[in-house]
Image (tube, rainbow, N blue to C red):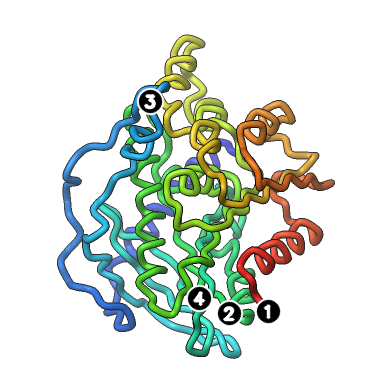
Amino acid sequence: MERTTQLRLFIRLCGLILTLGAASLTAWYCIPHTYASASTHAEKKQRCASANASYSSLVHQFDYNAKASLQVKEISVTQQDEVSIHDITYVSEDHIVSAYLVVPTGQGPFAGALFMHWLDDSPTGNRDEFLQDAITLAHKGTISLLPQGFYPWITPPTNSAKDCEATIQQTIALRRGLDLLVSTTTIDPQRIAFVGHDYGAMYGSILAGIDKRIKAAVLMAPTARFSNWNVPFFLDTLTARQRLDYTVDTASIDPITLMEYVSPTPVLFQYGRLDKYVSLADLNNLVEVAKDPTTIKLYATDHALADDLSHQDRLNWLETELKLP
């Protein structure tokens, strides 16, 4: 994962492609919805709470209108054996979110899974990363949603105020994804898991801490603070004082802040021993605030966690937690 100028150009190119692609959407017909257009202005601008805010204040950072229409639309559907892969969009605040909805055949009740991909300039640095896993889980009775991230995948970090708002908006987009999953009446709400990698895992730390609809979480190679990656890879011209200010200003949305509230939701942490983006000290900082039930596994691989062992461990753990056959 080379987070370089080339990656920044790649992010902006992806944003252009996704913007152009949104013009050719067809109506989604499987989930009740209305046809109002996406709002052009959020009801309020989201900002980070103070670093020492109460849990209630931390949660309120991510408030949203759960009654707003998801405006789900289907672009296409493909069939793979007995699994349907729906290429869809849904609306979250000011954003139109592209996603895959992977659905098994049958009447249910099904387990549910929400996947969030990593940031990388490889072919897996998007919603495709976990598509094959979602298909595998569908054969065992799981409906999965795989949204495309927009921050920092498309919109890069700029400053603490805007980055707070963008992080909150991305988290809300995932909460809206949960709304979409639970609106599918064949889903068992007591069997919903989250799987995230890299930035996706950081959002999973937030989501599992504030939204108890998540009943199990796999967090692959997250760092403890957004500033650990946002500053050196996107904001490297900041002075030492500005870097410190950025870290303080964004502390209330950091995984290390929300992680202590995830319990009693079970968590599987996965890290590579050769990971050059997450130090052992940073790993310890995050997992030390996690409460039981927590499982931590280290692998002889790098940040990509593309090895067979970690992959099989993830699937086995999910099958157990989601009570799959």
Q: Nearer the viewer, residue 110 or 135?
A: 110
Closer to the observer: label 2 or label 3?
3
| Residue 288 percent location from the top left of the image | 66, 31
Q: Based on the displayed image, in which of its 4 quarters is residue 133 positioned?
A: bottom right
Say few, some or many: other residues with alpha carbon within 10 Å of mark 3 (under 14 / 14 to 19 / 20 or more).
some
- Residue at the disc numbered 4: 102
Residue count near mark 4 (Cα–Cα under 10 Å), binned few <14, some 14–19, many ≥20: many
Residue at the image point whose x is 36% and y is 77% from the top: 75
Pointer 1: what residue?
Answer: 325
Counting residues from the start of the chain, the first of labels 4 and 1 encountered is: 4
In the foreground, 320 or 236: 320
Q: Which residue was labeled with disc 3?
A: 53
What's the amino acid at mark 3? Ala
Q: Are marks 4 and 2 in contact (CB under 8 Å)?
A: no
Local crowd at mark 1 within 10 Å, few (<14), some, or many (≥20)?
Answer: few
Residue 302 higher or lower than 146, as above or below: above
165 up-or-down from 194: above or below: above
Quote the CA–CA distance across marks 3 and 4.
38 Å
For the residues labelled 4 and 1, the Cα–Cα distance comes to: 18 Å
Instruction: Answer with the quarter of the image where residue 252 lies.
Output: top left
CA gap between label 4 and label 2 equals 11 Å
Q: CA distance from mark 2 to mark 1?
A: 8 Å
Amino acid residing under circle 4: Val
Left-right relation of 60 to 212:
left
Say whether disc 3 or disc 1 marks the residue closer to the N-terminus. 3
**Residue beneath the point at 55% across and 61% down:** 193
Residue type, mark 2 in image? Gly
